[in-house]
Amino acid sequence: MNIDEPSIVSFNKVGTVVDGGYEMAKQYALLLDGTSLPVIFGDQEMADILIQVFDCTASVVVFRCSPDEKAQMIQFVQKHNPKAFCCAIGDGANDINMIQVSQVGVGIEGNEGNQAAFFSDYSIPEFQGIRRLLLWHGRSFGLKTFSVFVP
């Protein structure tokens, strides 16, 4: 799909993007900043469009927003897509609500104290540990959890 060319994009029932009859892999990430969230949540039509955009993305990153908006975004995603998996990463007391609402919470110990680490499912000493946590331990968890279903 070329951005410069107009295209008709539709969504099938499993959330795979169909463009001109070809299925495309979810290869994009969506970045949302805090200034766009009040606009989205203030208008139902915008929220409906965002749900369709979520179906096209492999991941969504929300940044620079208030603690309530962080938790509200996770609840919004979980409400509209029960199969979505939310991982919240925070480093301070303002991230506790978001960490508790998500399926998996990761707290980073550091400058803002250890409050996020106390309330999280996983705690890491610094942000650079997130790569190992997600790639190695996430893979190990997936192999243990889903190996039962593989014939």
Image (cartoon, rainbow, N blue to C red):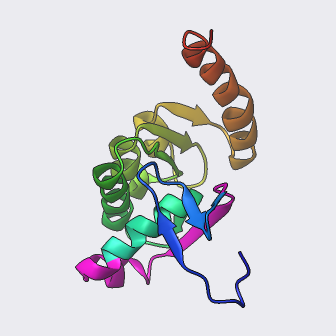
Q: Say how many tags the image has.
A: 0
34 is within the stretch colored magenta: yes
Q: Residue at x 66, y 63 (%)?
A: 28
Q: Left or right of 28: which side holds 9?
A: left
In the image, residue 34 sits, relative to residue 130, either above or below, namely below
In the image, residue 28 sits, relative to residue 111, either above or below, namely below
Q: Residue at x 36, y 50 (%)?
A: 81
> Is any atom of residue 60 visible in this view?
no
Give the quarter of the image for residue 5: bottom right
Viewer-proximal residue among 137 and 147: 147
Q: Left or right of 66: which side holds 149?
A: right
Q: Left or right of 128: which side holds 82?
A: left
Viewer-proximal residue among 53 and 123: 53
- Rendered location of residue 99, percent (x, y): 41, 45
Q: Residue at x 65, y 18 (%)?
A: 143
In the image, residue 6 sits, relative to residue 69, either above or below, namely below
> Is any atom of residue 1 visible in this view?
yes
Give, as a single range, the part of the protein colored magenta: 24-46
69 is within the stretch colored magenta: no
Q: Left or right of 131: which side holds 86?
A: left
Q: Quadrant of the C terminus?
A: top right
